[in-house]
Amino acid sequence: MTNQTLTPADHELLAEARAAREMAYAPYSNFHVGAAIRTGDGRIFRGCNVENASYGLSICAERVAIGSAVAAGSRDVEACAVVLPDGLRATPCGACRQWLTQFNPQMRVLLVGSDGTVEVTTAAALLPGGFEL
Ligand code: THU
């Protein structure tokens, strides 16, 4: 689904993801990513990527946002917005797809494209055959 009509709530979540991107700690890749999660209680949680000198320990914006929501007691994730640096298409990595799916396969996922248009999809659509216990 691309270029679907975005709701005011979608626009708010996208703005939060862009604000989160400003906080990215990416001294190694210089690739700044922002994410925002909306939960069922109407709260929004931001995430940015946080890198580490031991590169493999870096964490993506999406997982930081989800972890923030969970730590605040809000696990009912309804939507997630992701923005990469301007001009690049957001497409969550495999680990983040697994994390998103864990908390709601049907969550609305908003991915900003290279031309700024927003792709609207779901966690389940992003991760067919994801791992389940
Ligand atoms: N990154 C994210 O935070 N989210 C994504 O969806 C893609 C990649 C981060 C990880 C790393 O800090 C940097 O972007 C380059 O891969």
Image: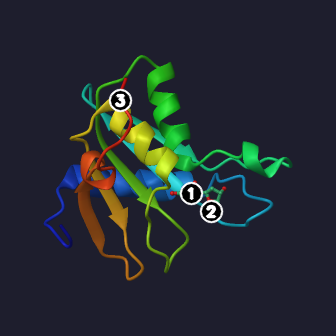
Residue type at numbered disc 3? Glu
Q: Residue furthest top?
A: 73
Residue at 38% from the left image edge and 40% from the top image edge: 100
Residue type at numbered disc 1? Arg
Give the residue number, with chain letter if any, for mark 2. Answer: 32
| Cα gap from disc 1 to disc 2, whole angstroms | 6 Å
Residue at 37% from the left image edge and 53% from the top image edge: 81
Most foreground residue, 29 or 68: 29
Q: In which quarter of the image is the N terminus?
A: bottom left
Residue at 43% from the left image edge and 63% from the top image edge: 91
Which dot marks residue 132? Answer: 3
Most foreground residue, 78 or 102: 102
Residue 112 position in % (x across, y down)? 38, 68
Look at the image and tell me whether residue 48 can be seen. Answer: yes
Quadrant where ligand 1 appears: bottom right
Residue 51 position in % (x across, y down)? 74, 49
For numbered disc 3, what is the local secondary structure?
A: loop
Whichever of labels 3 and 1 marks the residue nearer the N terminus, that label is 1
Q: Name above or below for residue 29 compared with residue 51.
A: below
Q: In this view, does 62 lie to the left or right of 9?
A: right
| Cα gap from disc 3 to disc 1, whole angstroms | 30 Å
Residue type at numbered disc 2? His
